Amino acid sequence: MIWSELDSRLIAVSMDADTKDGILERMGGRFVELGYCKSSYIQALKDREVEFPTGIDIDGVGVAMPHTDVSHVNRAGIGIATLKEPVTFIHMATDDTPVPVRVVFMLAVDDPGRHLEKIQDILAVIQDKKALEKIITAENAEEIIKIIKEKENLQ
């Protein structure tokens, strides 16, 4: 259940960002500031995103799930940002297919064995386009947590 790991301080609504790196810096910076991650986390996110892109298209809605190696993480957490305007990420199954992303789920995974499980938990929520649309239009962090909690309780 991802909702039990959500910290409203790691959720940004209507983030105004122009670039993928800007998003990674702002969200990653919050993880570092709150002690979830080491200072190396932000650069590690950028490096990994170049090598292994994380953008996906969910029925026409772009979502990215940046994350990195556990060596940059102090404790597990999940950050979420809805974007004021879409920002281009590269589709995870390609090297060059752009995806206009509206929602970013950033992961700080401290157990390498749980990495795929976390991504599957997020996919279970966002594959419901109605839930994803509600997240995009949410007005605050608490509303996003409520949407995810309700979606997970239905499964």
Image (cartoon, helix red, strand yellow):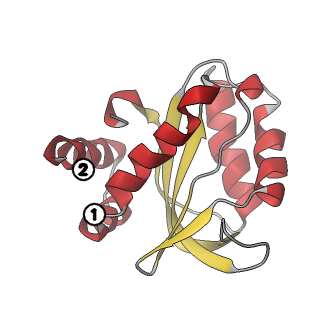
Residue 79 in sight here: no
Please provide percent x and percent y for residue 57.
Answer: 51, 74
State the residue in front, 3 or 53.
53
Between disc 2 and disc 1, whose residue precedes?
A: 1
State the residue in front, 13 or 117.
117
Count of numbered tags: 2
41, above or below 90, in the image: above
Q: Secondary structure at mark 2?
A: helix
Q: Residue furthest left?
A: 154
Residue at position x 83%, y 56% in the image: 51
Quadrant placement of the N terminus: top left
Q: Quadrant of residue 85?
A: bottom right
23, above or below 94, in the image: above
Residue 127 in sight here: yes
Please provide percent x and percent y for residue 86.
Answer: 56, 74
Please provide percent x and percent y for residue 116.
Answer: 54, 41
Asked if the residue at tag 1 contacts the one at tag 2, i.e. Cβ–Cβ closer than 8 Å, the answer is yes
Which disc, if any, is residue 21?
none
Q: Which residue is mark 1?
A: 134
Residue at position x 68%, y 79% in the image: 98
Please provide percent x and percent y for residue 133.
Answer: 31, 68
Q: Which residue is mark 2?
A: 147
Q: Amino acid at mark 2?
A: Ile
Along the horizontal axis of the image, is 38 left or right of 80? Answer: right
CA gap between label 2 and label 1 equals 7 Å
